Amino acid sequence: MTNWEKIVKKSTRCRFIYWIRSLFPFIFDMIMADNKRPNQINYFLMALNDPIDMLWNVKHLESPNVAVDNYKKEVYTAFTERVIKPICRKVEEEIRV
Protein backbone atom coordinates (compact mmCIF):
# COMPACT_ATOMS: atom_id res chain seq x y z
CA MET A 1 0.00 0.00 0.00
CA THR A 2 2.86 2.40 0.68
CA ASN A 3 4.26 1.91 -2.83
CA TRP A 4 1.05 2.82 -4.63
CA GLU A 5 2.59 5.89 -6.29
CA LYS A 6 5.43 3.87 -7.79
CA ILE A 7 3.03 1.18 -8.96
CA VAL A 8 0.72 3.70 -10.63
CA LYS A 9 3.61 5.52 -12.26
CA LYS A 10 5.09 2.29 -13.60
CA SER A 11 1.78 0.96 -14.91
CA THR A 12 0.75 4.21 -16.62
CA ARG A 13 3.98 5.02 -18.43
CA CYS A 14 3.61 6.01 -22.05
CA ARG A 15 7.09 5.08 -23.23
CA PHE A 16 5.58 3.08 -26.09
CA ILE A 17 4.72 6.41 -27.75
CA TYR A 18 8.33 6.70 -28.84
CA TRP A 19 7.81 3.81 -31.25
CA ILE A 20 4.80 5.44 -32.94
CA ARG A 21 6.35 8.87 -33.35
CA SER A 22 5.57 8.96 -37.07
CA LEU A 23 1.92 9.25 -36.03
CA PHE A 24 2.41 12.38 -33.91
CA PRO A 25 1.36 14.81 -36.67
CA PHE A 26 -1.82 12.84 -37.32
CA ILE A 27 -2.68 12.63 -33.63
CA PHE A 28 -2.25 16.41 -33.33
CA ASP A 29 -4.51 16.80 -36.39
CA MET A 30 -7.19 14.61 -34.82
CA ILE A 31 -7.10 16.58 -31.58
CA MET A 32 -7.21 19.92 -33.37
CA ALA A 33 -10.04 18.84 -35.70
CA ASP A 34 -12.47 18.33 -32.83
CA ASN A 35 -13.34 21.58 -31.05
CA LYS A 36 -14.54 19.63 -28.01
CA ARG A 37 -11.13 18.05 -27.35
CA PRO A 38 -8.52 20.83 -27.08
CA ASN A 39 -7.69 19.83 -23.49
CA GLN A 40 -6.38 16.50 -24.83
CA ILE A 41 -3.33 18.31 -26.21
CA ASN A 42 -2.14 18.75 -22.64
CA TYR A 43 -2.50 15.04 -21.89
CA PHE A 44 -0.85 14.03 -25.15
CA LEU A 45 2.09 16.36 -24.49
CA MET A 46 2.52 14.84 -21.03
CA ALA A 47 2.54 11.38 -22.61
CA LEU A 48 5.15 12.56 -25.12
CA ASN A 49 7.41 13.41 -22.20
CA ASP A 50 7.54 9.81 -20.91
CA PRO A 51 10.03 8.38 -23.47
CA ILE A 52 12.68 10.92 -22.45
CA ASP A 53 13.55 8.87 -19.31
CA MET A 54 14.13 5.87 -21.53
CA LEU A 55 16.24 7.85 -24.02
CA TRP A 56 18.64 8.97 -21.30
CA ASN A 57 19.72 5.32 -21.03
CA VAL A 58 20.72 4.99 -24.69
CA LYS A 59 24.09 3.27 -25.10
CA HIS A 60 24.47 3.03 -28.89
CA LEU A 61 25.18 6.74 -29.42
CA GLU A 62 28.09 8.89 -28.29
CA SER A 63 25.84 10.60 -25.82
CA PRO A 64 22.22 10.18 -24.75
CA ASN A 65 21.80 13.88 -25.48
CA VAL A 66 21.74 13.08 -29.19
CA ALA A 67 18.75 10.76 -28.85
CA VAL A 68 16.91 13.12 -26.50
CA ASP A 69 17.56 16.16 -28.70
CA ASN A 70 16.42 14.34 -31.84
CA TYR A 71 13.23 13.23 -30.14
CA LYS A 72 12.53 16.72 -28.84
CA LYS A 73 13.08 18.20 -32.32
CA GLU A 74 10.69 15.68 -33.82
CA VAL A 75 7.99 16.49 -31.27
CA TYR A 76 8.58 20.24 -31.62
CA THR A 77 8.33 20.07 -35.41
CA ALA A 78 5.08 18.09 -35.33
CA PHE A 79 3.59 20.39 -32.68
CA THR A 80 4.62 23.54 -34.54
CA GLU A 81 3.35 22.35 -37.93
CA ARG A 82 0.07 20.82 -36.76
CA VAL A 83 -0.94 22.98 -33.78
CA ILE A 84 0.87 26.31 -33.58
CA LYS A 85 0.80 27.31 -37.26
CA PRO A 86 -2.91 26.53 -37.77
CA ILE A 87 -3.80 28.51 -34.66
CA CYS A 88 -1.67 31.43 -35.83
CA ARG A 89 -3.36 31.33 -39.26
CA LYS A 90 -6.83 31.37 -37.67
CA VAL A 91 -5.90 34.26 -35.39
CA GLU A 92 -4.49 36.21 -38.33
CA GLU A 93 -7.67 35.60 -40.34
CA GLU A 94 -9.81 36.80 -37.45
CA ILE A 95 -7.71 39.93 -37.03
CA ARG A 96 -7.97 40.72 -40.74
CA VAL A 97 -11.75 40.31 -40.71
Image (tube, rainbow, N blue to C red):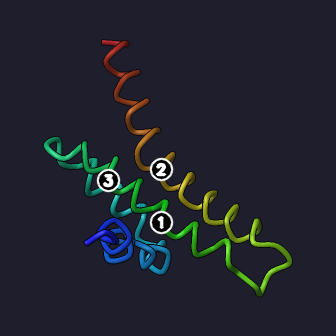
Label 1 to label 2: alpha-carbon separation: 16 Å
List the residue tagged with mark 1. Answer: 50
Label 2 to label 3: alpha-carbon separation: 13 Å
Tag 1–tag 2 contact (CB < 8 Å): no
Q: Earlier in the sequence, mark 1 or mark 2?
A: 1
The crowding category of the residue bearing disc 3, from other C-alpha atoms within 10 Å (few below 14, some 14 to 19, many at least 20), is: few
Q: Percent x, y for residue 17?
A: 42, 73
In the image, taking residue 6 as reference, residue 39 lies left or right, namely left
Amino acid identity at mark 3: Tyr
Q: Which mark is residue 43?
A: 3
- Please determine whether, in this image, residue 87 is positioned above or below residue 51: above
Nearer the observer: mark 1 or 2; the answer is 1
Q: Quadrant of residue 62?
A: bottom right
User: Please, what secondary structure does the residue beneath circle 1 have?
Assistant: loop
In the image, taking residue 35 as reference, residue 59 lies left or right, namely right
Q: Quadrant of residue 54?
A: bottom right
User: Please, what secondary structure does the residue beneath circle 2 have?
Assistant: helix
Amino acid identity at mark 2: Phe
Q: Earlier in the sequence, mark 3 or mark 1?
A: 3
Q: Percent x, y for residue 59?
A: 75, 85
Total marks in image: 3
Q: Earlier in the sequence, mark 2 or mark 3?
A: 3
| Screen quadrant of the C terminus | top left
Q: Which mark is residue 79?
A: 2
Residue plotted at (68% across, 78% down): 57
Label 3 to label 1: alpha-carbon separation: 11 Å
10 or 39, which lies in front? 10
Residue plotted at (70% across, 80% down): 58
Amino acid identity at mark 1: Asp
